């Protein structure tokens, strides 16, 4: 099963912006309880959407540049990119069903 | 879908996990349905200081994972799904979820509550861009900045105290002239030089283009308006119950909490409520845990009587 790959400030452009598929980035930090809660959901989705949507995790503590660039001031935030542009911003803990709706929308 | 269970518990916070542990130890085939991850509201708590047995306090996330371990150790089954509705007429109850339907003879509803919104312009638009409902999640984004906390209860003051680690100043905005929060938190907040209070004040709107820049405030006594420049606002104005799908199914209080008696019975045979979601709950981890135990014992008694 495909696990979300680790994305950092240096690799962001190459991995996320230049991705051929839609790409979901999970902005998180180790001190954030709800981030720990959403992580396993994102992992499951990475498996279910393998080959259709790319998945990554970005630690905002270690990579403040990307978080600032995309105006992330709340975590967990999931940013869904399509064609190199942020398409949907999902803030806070959400159910898997709700996340799937956003992911499916990016595939149409 | 699935084998028929004796008991289904909706919600995996302290009330649900406590009920699940009791039920599992009674060897009742029990399913707990949680929409995200066990723990509920406490996963947002940096430190839980008022749960007996942890004199140094314990992080909410750690306490949640210990409670989960203790419940599953005895065989509690946990599924992740979002509940859309329940059917409670007759002996067999049905729980409709995002992942399908589940059936059991008894239900314990322990779905907890969510933070209330202020309901002012700008709140929704600037969520995640300076508007936050979780200080432990987002505090670190506001290093050396001026931020506001709206509310006067325990969560508001805990948030304000936590945020002083990062912010240069924390302004607590409260609509009354005294706090609801417990005394020890008030003492700490009044002693913290970075915290200022604005009394008798409400937020009229949250303003900013791509991120929060200022709050439009009004003094409720004088009706004078004022602007406060902040880069973030943390909203802690109370909790509302997750009972939208229960309207017309169970008896609810005017605020939407489930009405129960002291056995946690809802009035529908075999259906119980526990924790923050029930009317009159003091909304503490310790009271939720007690409710969960009471509800599980009531459910067990009901199941052996039918």
Image (cartoon, helix red, strand yellow):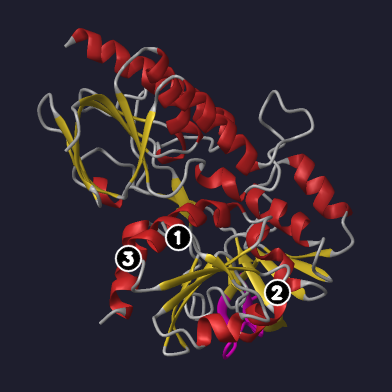
- Which sits earlier in the primary sequence, circle 3 or circle 2? 2
Q: Earlier in the sequence, mark 3 or mark 1?
A: 1
Mark 3 touching mark 1, by CB under 8 A? no
Identify the disc placed on residue A63: 2
* Quadrant of image for the C terminus of chain B: top left
Residue at image point 29% right, 52% down: B244
Q: Residue at x 20, y 34 (%)?
A: B2
Q: Which residue is mark 1?
A: A42
As helix, strand or loop, the secondary structure at mark 1 comes to helix
Q: Earlier in the sequence, mark 1 or mark 2?
A: 1
Question: Which quadrant of the figure has residue B222?
Answer: bottom right
Look at the image and give the residue range highlighted in magenta: B204-222
Q: Do the residues at pointers 3 and 2 share their chain? A: yes
Q: Which residue is mark 3?
A: A100
**Where's residue A37, x and y in %?**
51, 51
Residue B170 locus on image (x, y percent) = 77, 67
Mark 3 to mark 2 CA distance (whole Å): 27 Å
Q: Is residue B218 magenta?
A: yes
Q: Residue furthest top?
A: B305
Q: Are marks 1 and 2 on the same chain?
A: yes
Report, in whole angstroms, how far the alpha carbon at label 1 lies from the one at label 2.
20 Å
**Disc 1 chain ID:** A
Kindly identify the residue that appears in the image at 62 percent across and 76 percent down.
B130
Q: Quadrant of residue B102?
A: top left
Q: Total of numbered circles in the picture?
A: 3
Q: Quadrant of residue A14?
A: bottom right
Quick one: quadrant of the N terminus of chain B? top left
SS assignment at label 3: helix
Q: Residues within 10 Å of mark 2 (few under 14, many from 20)?
A: some
- State left or right for residue B196 relative to residue B90: right
Looking at the image, do the residues carrying marks 1 and 2 touch, with CB atoms under 8 Å apart?
A: no
Mark 3 vs mark 1, CA separation in Å: 10 Å
């Amino acid at each position: 099963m495909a696990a979300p790959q680790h994305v950092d400030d240096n690799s962001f452009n190459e991995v996320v912006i230049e991705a051929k598929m839609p790409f979901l980035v999970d902005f998180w930090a180790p001190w954030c309880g709800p981030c720990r809660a959403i992580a396993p959901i994102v992992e499951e989705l990475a498996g279910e959407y393998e080959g259709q949507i790319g998945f990554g995790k970005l630690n905002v503590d270690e990579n403040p540049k990307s978080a600032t660039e995309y105006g992330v001031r709340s975590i967990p935030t999931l940013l869904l990119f399509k064609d190199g542009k942020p398409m949907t911003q999902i803030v806070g803990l959400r159910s898997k069903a709700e996340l799937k709706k956003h992911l499916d929308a990016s595939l149409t | 879908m699935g084998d028929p269970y004796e008991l289904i518990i909706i919600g995996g916070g302290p009330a649900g996990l406590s009920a699940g542990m009791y039920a599992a130890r009674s060897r009742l085939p029990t399913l707990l349905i949680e929409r995200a991850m066990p723990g509920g509201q406490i996963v947002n708590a940096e430190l839980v200081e008022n749960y007996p047995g942890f004199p140094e306090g314990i992080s909410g996330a750690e306490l949640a994972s210990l409670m989960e371990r203790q419940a599953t150790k005895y065989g509690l089954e946990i599924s992740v799904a979002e509940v859309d509705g329940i059917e409670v007429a007759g002996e067999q109850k049905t729980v409709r979820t995002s992942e399908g339907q589940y059936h059991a003879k008894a239900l314990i509803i322990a779905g907890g509550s969510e933070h209330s919104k202020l309901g002012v312009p700008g709140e929704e638009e600037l969520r995640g861009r300076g508007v936050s409902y979780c200080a432990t999640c987002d505090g670190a984004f506001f290093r050396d900045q001026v931020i506001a906390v709206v509310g006067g209860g325990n969560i508001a003051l805990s948030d304000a105290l936590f945020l002083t680690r990062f912010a240069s100043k924390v302004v607590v905005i409260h609509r009354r002239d005294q706090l609801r929060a417990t005394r020890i938190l008030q003492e700490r907040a009044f002693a913290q030089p970075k915290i200022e209070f604005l009394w008798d004040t409400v937020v009229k709107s949250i303003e900013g283009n791509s991120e929060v820049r200022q709050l439009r405030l009004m003094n409720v006594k004088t009706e004078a308006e004022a602007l406060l420049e902040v880069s973030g606002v943390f909203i802690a104005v109370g909790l509302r119950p997750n009972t939208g799908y229960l309207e017309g199914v169970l008896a609810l209080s005017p605020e939407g909490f489930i009405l129960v008696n002291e056995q946690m019975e809802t009035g529908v045979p075999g259906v119980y409520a526990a924790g923050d979601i029930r009317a009159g709950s003091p909304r503490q981890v310790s009271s939720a845990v007690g409710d969960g135990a009471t509800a599980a014992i009531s459910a067990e008694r009901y199941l052996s009587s039918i």
